[in-house]
């Protein structure tokens, strides 16, 4: 059986990712990141006017789904463009 590649998305992943994308906060965070520049948690909180706990909950969901990556230095996030493009094509 063929091993899945790191950015390969299967049907179950697509269903889970679509559910994440139906959440307006997740979509807003991804829209901020889709500009191409990494963004810090603080900037997301300010731009979307949300609590830190809400922001971190959604960032964790998106990170676990592989839609965003965390950069260590500086500590910020950026979109996983390969997986995001695959998702957009499937929607």
Image (tube, helix red, strand yellow):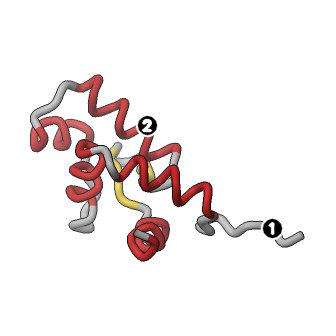
Picture coordinates of residue 84 (x, y %)?
42, 66
Compared across the picture, whether 43 is left or right of 15 comes to: left
Q: Which disc number belongs to residue 3? A: 1
Q: Quadrant of the C terminus?
A: bottom left
Q: Nearer the viewer, residue 63 or 72?
A: 63
Picture coordinates of residue 47 (x, y %)?
10, 43
Picture coordinates of residue 79 (x, y %)?
37, 60
Q: Residue at the location (41% across, 73% down)?
A: 85
Q: Residue at the location (19% across, 25% down)?
A: 51
SS category of the residue bearing label 2: helix
Q: Residue at the location (53% across, 60% down)?
A: 14
Q: Quadrant of the N terminus?
A: bottom right
Asked if 12 appears above or below 51 in the picture, the reply is below
Residue marked by disc 2:
60
Compared across the picture, whether 13 is left or right of 32 comes to: right
State yes or no: discs 1 and 2 in contact (Cβ < 8 Å): no
User: Hey, which quadrant is residue 52 in on the image?
Assistant: top left
Picture coordinates of residue 49 (x, y %)?
10, 34
Q: Earlier in the sequence, mark 1 or mark 2?
A: 1
Compared across the picture, whether 91 is left or right of 64 comes to: left
Asked if 20 appears above or below 14 in the picture, the reply is above
SS category of the residue bearing label 1: loop
Q: Residue at the location (20% across, 56% down)?
A: 32
């Amino acid at each position: 059986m063929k091993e899945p590649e790191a950015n390969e998305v299967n049907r179950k992943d697509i269903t889970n990712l679509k559910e994440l994308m139906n959440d307006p906060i997740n979509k807003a965070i991804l829209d901020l990141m889709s500009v191409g520049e990494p963004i810090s948690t603080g900037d997301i909180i300010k731009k979307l006017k949300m609590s830190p706990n809400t922001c971190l909950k959604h960032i964790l969901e998106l990170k676990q789904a592989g839609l965003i990556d965390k950069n260590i230095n500086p500590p910020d996030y950026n979109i996983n463009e390969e997986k995001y493009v695959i998702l957009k094509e499937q929607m």
